[in-house]
Image: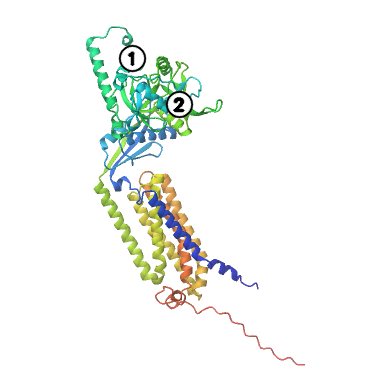
């Protein structure tokens, strides 16, 4: 008979300290990352922190049966996120739910009525001629001439053409006029073009008829110019509150002021003429890489038949002007997202915007242009408002429930397993520490928010983790009942316990994954937390509980089967130790000679 392999048992028991050191170093590293990220606590959801949750359901426009798709929904999310951030809400969350719903979660301290009005309306995209522009705020130059300052804007180097063009500089002309004079002159210069029969600003053919303006209309135009001049002079686009209110209440047919960022990251303020082209005039837009001329990324646009005529008309007028009045601003919800210049009329029904784009910038601009013609409307399905006080009460109740559950588990472990609870309780603490740190890190990384169902999932996980310890301990006790000493019992019990723990945790993780996929909303928080804690249970059992049990099995308190160790052979009803004895040889009868 082959001799047993003694080396295998010794190998399985060797160096448990390495596993313990590994998991403790991992906890220390994750904790350090948590504090370095500036988020030492998990991000709380609306139901715990307080705030407003709005559910919007997408509807197809007539004649567009397949408009509800992933691309259009993601574009809508981007636009709504810009709107909510425009309210000064830095921690708002906008995400899709299912195939046709968008959830907007706005934390406490926000005007819920204003937020609902912002996210529930269709985005407005316009092409407006630039009348004046300059860098705003502290970055502005000492001489605030809009024409001169446009040369410092790297956004002005973007160019709209019929064909791909890689133009890297514009040629703005300097002006010695003051800021107020520049705005007034620009409005006067724009009065004739804007009164022409542009399809976007004229409601009837008579709108383009020539005639002498009446004194009352001249006085009204002068008053409007003076008001706009004052708004432009006072506008500071570096101030978030002023950016949100810039151009508030202005119509598409009126001149307005607006803000936008140039490619250097500086805020610029603009005086813009009446809208000449609307977003519904855009048929399609895409970000493409120019492989022929190696000009980099560019944005292509195609217009409808009516939009093509409007765009040709406005670009023809702009091409005759000096910078910055040869630029048109692409304005989305009052924000300037791009302001390319033109040098000739673009009459082909399509155009390209080229410049110093990277892939992300080009795709972002293309998505915004496409949203102008997005065949979707959104209906407000539900609005839930939770006060901060109610959220705090729910969080407090959840923490109390978790503490009670943990306390009951600890009492059970101490009473039933006695000394083995010294292994189980630190394992629970390690599992809890890992869960807390990872939840805190997932907030700023993937936007995970701890809501009330997620707290329930964490409480359920206490039982799952304790169940793994119980399986291991009972396997060890079974081996001791068979008459084995502690150290061999631990190593023989581990393979069987490991198999049971892995199967049990796999079933729990599978249930959590299915629940996460098929459900929406807050229930996903429960499923995510349950799946996360199930994975951490495997990590803790393999890298902490088993190595710690191996180390303690070498201690006399446990190895001798002390009555408080939880491994007393007498209490467990162990059989006498297995001892191998030689069989007595059978008596041999003497043979006769």
Q: Is residue 417 left or right of residue 247?
A: right
Task: Residue at 48% x, 58% y: name it.
Answer: 503
Which residue is at the front of the view, 19 or 259? 259
Residue 172 position by quadrant:
top left
Q: Which mark is residue 455?
A: none
User: Do tag 2 and tag 1 residues touch (Cβ < 8 Å)?
Assistant: no
SS type, badge 2: strand
Instruction: Please tell me which of labels 2 and 1 falls first in the chain.
Output: 1
The residue at which mark 2 appears reads as 285
Q: Point out residue 538 in the picture as x, y percentages from the top left corner.
A: 46, 58
The residue at which mark 1 appears reads as 189
Residue 155 position by quadrant:
top left
Q: Is residue 146 above or below residue 451?
A: above
- Quarter of the image with the C terminus is bottom right
Q: Is residue 332 above or below residue 545?
A: above
- Quarter of the image with the N terminus is bottom right
The outermost residue toward the bottom is 593
Q: Point out residue 282 in the picture as x, y percentages from the top left corner.
A: 42, 23
Residue 369 in view, yes or no: no
Q: Residues within 10 Å of mark 1 (few under 14, many from 20)?
A: some
Q: Is residue 111 left or right of residue 469?
A: left
Q: Point out residue 236 in the picture as x, y percentages from the top left corner.
A: 30, 30
């Amino acid at each position: 008979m082959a001799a047993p392999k003694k080396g295998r048992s010794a190998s399985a028991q060797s160096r448990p300290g390495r596993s313990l050191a590994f998991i403790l170093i991992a906890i220390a590293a994750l904790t350090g990352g948590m504090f370095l990220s500036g988020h030492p606590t998990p991000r709380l959801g609306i139901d715990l922190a307080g705030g407003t949750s709005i559910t919007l359901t997408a509807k197809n426009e007539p004649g567009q049966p397949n408009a509800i798709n992933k691309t259009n929904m993601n574009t809508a999310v981007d636009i709504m996120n810009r709107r909510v951030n425009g309210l000064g809400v830095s921690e708002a969350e906008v995400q899709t739910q299912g195939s046709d719903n968008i959830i907007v979660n706005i934390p406490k301290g926000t005007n819920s009525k204003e937020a609902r009005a912002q996210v529930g309306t269709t985005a407005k995209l316009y092409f407006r001629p630039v009348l004046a522009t300059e860098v705003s705020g502290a970055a502005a130059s000492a001489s605030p001439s809009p024409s001169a300052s446009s040369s410092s804007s790297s956004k002005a180097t973007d160019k709209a053409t019929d064909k791909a063009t890689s133009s890297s500089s514009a040629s703005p002309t300097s002006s010695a006029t003051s800021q107020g004079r520049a705005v007034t002159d620009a409005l006067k210069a724009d009065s004739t073009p804007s009164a022409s029969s542009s399809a976007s600003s004229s409601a009837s053919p008579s709108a383009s008829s020539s005639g002498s303006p009446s004194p009352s209309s001249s006085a009204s135009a002068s008053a409007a110019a003076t008001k706009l001049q004052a708004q432009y002079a006072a506008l500071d686009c570096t101030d978030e509150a002023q950016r949100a209110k810039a151009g508030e209440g202005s119509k598409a047919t009126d001149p307005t002021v607006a803000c936008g960022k140039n490619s250097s990251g500086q805020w610029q303020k603009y005086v813009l003429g009446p809208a000449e082209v609307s977003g519904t005039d855009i048929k399609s837009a895409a970000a493409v890489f120019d492989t022929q001329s190696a000009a980099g990324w560019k944005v292509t646009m195609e217009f409808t038949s009516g939009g093509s005529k409007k765009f040709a008309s406005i670009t023809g007028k702009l091409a005759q002007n000096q910078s910055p009045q040869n630029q048109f601003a692409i304005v989305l919800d009052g924000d300037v997202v791009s302001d390319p210049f033109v040098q000739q009329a673009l009459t082909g029904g399509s155009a390209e915007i080229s410049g110093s784009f990277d892939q992300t910038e080009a795709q972002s601009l293309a998505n915004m242009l496409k949203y102008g013609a997005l065949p979707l409307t959104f209906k407000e399905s539900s609005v839930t408002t939770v006060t901060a006080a109610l959220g705090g009460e729910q969080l407090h109740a959840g923490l109390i429930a978790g503490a009670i559950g943990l306390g009951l588990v600890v009492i059970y472990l101490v009473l039933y397993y006695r000394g083995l609870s010294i292994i189980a309780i630190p394992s629970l603490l390690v599992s809890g520490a890992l869960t807390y740190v990872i939840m805190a890190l997932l907030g700023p990384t993937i936007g995970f928010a701890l809501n009330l169902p997620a707290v329930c999932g964490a409480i359920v996980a206490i039982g799952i983790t304790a169940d793994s310890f119980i399986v291991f301990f009972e396997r060890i006790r079974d081996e001791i009942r068979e008459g084995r000493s502690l150290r061999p019992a631990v190593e023989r019990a581990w393979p069987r316990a490991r198999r049971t723990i892995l199967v049990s945790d796999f079933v729990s993780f599978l249930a959590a994954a299915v629940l996460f996929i098929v459900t929406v909303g807050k229930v996903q928080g429960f499923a995510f937390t349950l799946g996360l804690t199930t994975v951490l249970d495997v990590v803790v059992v393999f890298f902490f509980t088993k190595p710690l049990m191996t180390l303690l099995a070498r201690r006399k308190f446990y190895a001798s089967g002390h009555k408080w160790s939880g491994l007393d052979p007498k209490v467990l009803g162990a059989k006498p130790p297995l001892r191998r004895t030689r069989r007595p040889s059978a008596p041999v009868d003497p043979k006769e000679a």
